Image: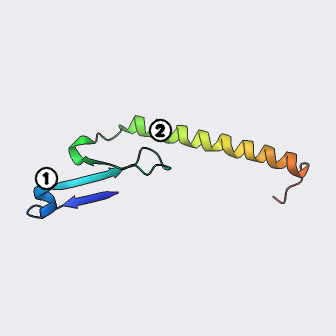
Amino acid sequence: GLYYYPSGTELAEQFDDGWRYALMPNKNSDEISYLKEDQIKPLTPEELFSEITAEIDFYQQQITILQQQLAVLTGGFTNA
């Protein structure tokens, strides 16, 4: 999530003004870390492409596995 602490507010006086990013280590975690905008380094386009491609490959493999399991359970018959 994103938070913004405007100058002159109590939160800005306590934590400094500016943007804060609320980050979870993973989607199943209940831990949250708060980072200031200058603590985050965006991925390069190449790094972003690599991350997205790896995630697509992972989910395509999961789909293939599920399709194979479905074929075993249905004896090869599907409604698709």
Q: Which residue is mark 1?
A: 16
Residue picked out by circle 2: 51
Query: Which residue ends up furthest to the left in the rendered image?
Result: 8
* Label 1 secondary element: loop
Kindly identify the amino acid type of the residue bearing the numbered disc 2. Answer: Glu
* x then y, percent, for residue 72: 86, 45
- Callout 2 secondary element: helix
Q: Farthest residue in the front direction?
A: 30
Residue 48: % across, % down: 42, 40
Residue placed furthest toward the right? 75
- 1 vs 2, front mark: 1
x 84%, y 60%: residue: 79
Q: Residue at x 85, y 56 (%)?
A: 78
Give 18 or 79, whichever is nearer the viewer. 18
**Quadrant in the picture for the N terminus:** bottom left
Q: CA distance from mark 1 to mark 2?
A: 32 Å
| Residue displayed at 12% across by 63% down | 10
**Residue at x 88%, y 52% (from the top left corner):** 74
Checking the image for residue 55, the label placed there is none
> Relative to residue 9, is residue 21 drawn left or right?
right
Q: Amino acid at mark 1?
A: Asp
Residue placed most toward the observer, 72 or 44? 72
* Nearer to the camera, 31 or 25: 31
The answer to whether marks 1 and 2 mark residues whose Cβ atoms lie closer than 8 Å is no
> Total marks drawn?
2
Residue in the foreground of this view, choosing between 2 and 44: 2
- In the picture shown, does residue 11 fall above or below 33? below
- Answer above or below: position of 65 versus 15: above
Q: Quadrant of the C terminus?
A: bottom right
On screen, residue 12 versus residue 80, left or right, reads left
Percent of width and height locating residue 63: 69, 46
